[in-house]
Amino acid sequence: MADEPTPADDCPVLEQKLGMLATAPQQDGTGEYLPPPQSGESNKDERTVMTGIRSVCGLLAAGVVATAAACAPAAEHAADKVPAAVTVSKQPSETLSTLFEQALPNVPGKTFTSAIVDFPPAARAVPHRHGNAFVYAYVLEGTVRSQLEGGPMRTYHQGENWVEPPGAHHTLTENTSQTESAKLLVIFISNTGDELRVADPPR
């Protein structure tokens, strides 16, 4: 892309045009041409005009340079403030789908609920509780790693199961595979009306 002309670039042309105007015949208020100035006066006038033109051109050039110098750091500073793109990878999580829910007729205040919990590859559940529910979990597919607060970390494969006592804090539940899904059948015996899963507050 070609550089655009600046006021300083036009100075030679400006000098030529104003020099021609300075030496052109002058008219008075009636339209009559005035007699040309004497040779010495003419040269003096021309020198005065040309000196003024060169002074103006010099000021223009100096202004262009000063403006460019002032703008360059500002542009660099503005570029420094542009935030870099940040990519955040979100940890996949599990989904719970209720299969069946029924209040227990022989245990007032208690409800039986069965659900399927699907874990995509590498999915991890946030730490949570199941209120005062008694929980039974059975691995239908894949492999799941689980840990209750205060207990050991265990890995459960297809066909294996575990239980959680009421009020247990489930600190870890994750699919151990990076490529295969995992699936649980979960049974809850809970207080009627309680939420089946309450996640820990964000830290």
Image (cartoon, rainbow, N blue to C red):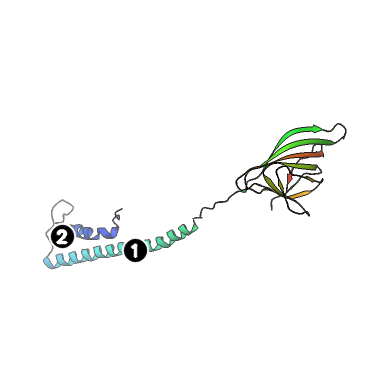
Label 1–label 2 contact, CB within 8 A: no
| Residue corresponding to mark 2 | 23
Q: Residue at x 84, y 36 (%)?
A: 110
The image shows residue 168 at horizontal and vertical percentages of: 79, 48
Q: Could you tell whether 95 is left or right of 162 in the image?
A: left
**Which sits earlier in the primary sequence, circle 1 or circle 2?**
2
Depth check: 108 or 86 in front? 108
Front residue (pair 54, 181) = 181
Total numbered labels placed on residues in the image: 2
Q: Which mark is residue 24?
A: none
Residue at figure coordinates x 17%, y 58% from the top left? 20
Q: Which residue is mark 1?
A: 65
Give the camera-side residue of 74 and 15.
74
Kindly give the residue lying farthest to the front in the view shown.
159
Name the front one of labels 1 and 2: 1
Residue 51 in the image, given as x and y percentages of width and height: 23, 66
Name the kind of residue labelled 2 in the image: Thr
**Within the image, what quadrant is residue 46 found in?**
bottom left
**Which of the 4 image quarters holds residue 151?**
bottom right
Q: Amino acid at mark 1?
A: Val
Answer few, some or many: residues within 10 Å of disc 2's Cα (few below 14, many 20 plus, some between 14 and 19). Answer: some
- Residue at screen point 30% across, 63% down: 61
Q: Position of residue 23 (x, y in %)?
A: 15, 60
Secondary structure at badge 1 equals helix
Crowd band around label 1 with a 10 angstrom C-alpha radius: few (<14), some (14–19), many (20+): few
Residues at marks 1 and 2, CA–CA distance in whole angstroms:
32 Å
Where's residue 28, x and y in %? 17, 54
Give the secondary structure at mark 2: helix
